[in-house]
Image (tube, rainbow, N blue to C red):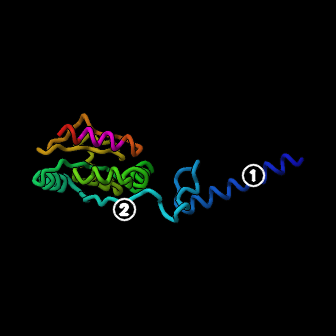
Amino acid sequence: HRLWKSMGLVLLLLGAIEIIGAASGADNWAKPLENLRTGARSGHAEEIVFQRIKSLGDLENAVARANQAGKPAMLDFYADWCVECIRMERNTFGESEIQGLFGQVQPLQADVTANDETDQALMEKYGIIGPPAILFFDRQGREMPAYRLVGYFEPGEFSEHLRKVLEAQ
């Protein structure tokens, strides 16, 4: 009888910890109190600011401006309803190593939350079914299909991939 009461107490405590973690913005059930260590997201630098694009014309202009500045461009397809997109923003793009690499590339973001005709035309042009998807454009403005990413990537995987893209320039 004491065993069951003890187990119930332990489960109650674990449940309370998970609720506190979720309220603090944690998204990893195995480390629910990770955000509470320093009162903020420890180890994360200031978030990168993407240049927002909406249409094919916006994309062409943004890639051309990046090319004039001597940079390749990276296009991130994002939506507010996309769980993996939010994980990429929180866990991957916020890492200081990746932000340093973003200094060598023009980060663009197409917010396709509305999924309107303009969003659908942009996704259809590149054969994107839905977010998250990341496309890379070389310094001549051509897409680099061999380097396309679909889905969530951990910071280490993403930084390694981004280095390969930059080396291929």
Number of the label disc, if any, that sits on residue 46: 2
Q: Position of residue 45 (x, y in %)?
A: 38, 59
Quadrant where the image shows the C terminus: top left
* Nearer to me, 28 or 78: 28
The residue sitting at 11% across, 44% down in the picture is 140
Q: Magenta region: which residues?
A: 158-165
* Left or right, 129 with reference to 34: left
Q: Position of residue 106 (x, y in %)?
A: 22, 53
* Number of numbered discs: 2
Local secondary structure at mark 1: helix
Does label 2 or label 1 sit earlier along the sequence? 1
Q: Which residue is mark 1?
A: 10
Q: Position of residue 40 (x, y in %)?
A: 49, 63
- Whether the magenta-drawn stretch holds residue 12 is answered as no
Local secondary structure at mark 2: loop
Circle 1: residue type: Val
Task: From the image, state whether disc 2 or disc 1 is nearer to you.
Answer: 2
Q: Are marks 2 and 1 in contact (CB under 8 Å)?
A: no
The residue sitting at 15% across, 53% down in the picture is 66
Above or below for 39 versus 146: below
Residue extending farthest to the right is: 1
Circle 2: residue type: Glu
Residue 139 in which image quadrant: top left
* Nearer to me, 3 or 37: 37
